[in-house]
Image (cartoon, rainbow, N blue to C red):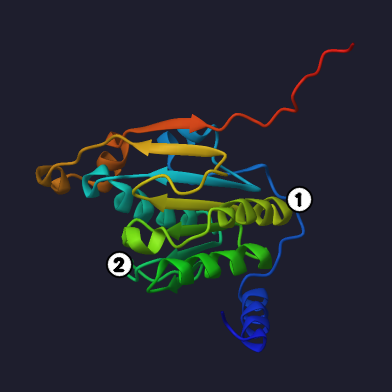
Amino acid sequence: MAPPGKIVELRQILAQRFPLQNAPPAALIATGLPGFDQLLGGGLPRGALTQLIAPLPSNGSTLLLQEMIHALRQQAQLVALVDGADCFEPVSTADHLLWVRCRYALEAVKAADLLLRDGNIPVTILDLKQNREAELRKIPGQTWYRLQRVAEETQTTLFLLTRHPLAPSAGMNLHARSALASADLSSFSSTLIAALCFQAQRRKPFQEPAYAEV
């Protein structure tokens, strides 16, 4: 855990680089990828955790991540990428991207927690799909409920990428069903993005149990 002084210093830097907007935030944040936004119902929901489950490298999750960041840049939307295994390869640098390079899953989760609590950046992407299973098992289950609560309080969004389901508190689970072949890589990225297939599964809202009057 970073010393308190370092956390305060990081928050000051975030506030300077990414000042809060005065306008009320929309309920959804469009990713800029039409097909993906349609699947999401208009975009990533604020105040929620959305989980993308991509078991195989051929599912296209890395391509989706690259194109999503690029599209958000085009909209001048602020986004933070927490790279859980320091393996992201950015196509280009961006003024609207905060890239947090971590080596371990627990370190990445703490960084995502800090970014959500700060509230200056609307979209935080937590990429854990390259982290080892042994690391992921060390993440306490209640961590995901805490992150969900923080996102709800700050009205920011957390987008989690993983090979297997990790966050039971996710408002929506997206399952990657694509299977790209090496020959597909010669196509334009827009064509590949349109070919990606995802299945959306929304979590049912919690309801209080009904009791019969006696």
Compared to 58, does 175 lie above or below?
above
Q: Decide which of 31, 118 is in the foreground and name it.
A: 118
Instruction: Report whether residue 72 is seen.
Output: yes
Image coords of residue 11 (percent x, y): 66, 77
Q: Nearer the viewer, residue 95 or 159?
A: 159
Q: Residues within 10 Å of mark 1 (few under 14, many from 20)?
A: few
Identity, as a three-letter code, of the amino acid under mark 1: Pro
User: Dividing the picture into quarters, in which one does residue 34 lie?
Assistant: top left
In this orientation, does residue 32 appear? no
Query: Which of the image's four quarters has the N terminus?
Result: bottom right
For residue 89, which numbered disc appears in the image?
2
Q: CA distance from mark 2 to mark 1?
A: 33 Å
- Residue kind at label 2, given as amino acid type: Glu
**Image point (46%, 59%), residue name:** 126
**Which of the labelled discs sits on residue 24, or is there none?**
1
Q: Nearer the viewer, residue 142 or 82?
A: 142
Q: Element under label 2?
A: loop
> Which residue, as the protein is rendered here, is positioned at the far right?
214
The quadrant of the picture occupied by the C terminus is top right
Crowding at label 2, few (<14), some or many (≥20) Cα neighbours within 10 Å? few
* Horizontal relation, residue 130 to residue 69: left or right: left
View extreme (left): residue = 183
Q: Position of residue 207 (x, y in %)?
A: 71, 28
Most distant residue in the front direction: 214
Counting labels gives 2
Question: Residue 47: which disc?
Answer: none
Of callouts 2 and 1, the N-terminal one: 1
Residue 196 relative to residue 11: left or right:
left
Nearer-the-camera pick, 67 or 137: 137
Give the image location of residue 178, x and y in percent.
26, 36
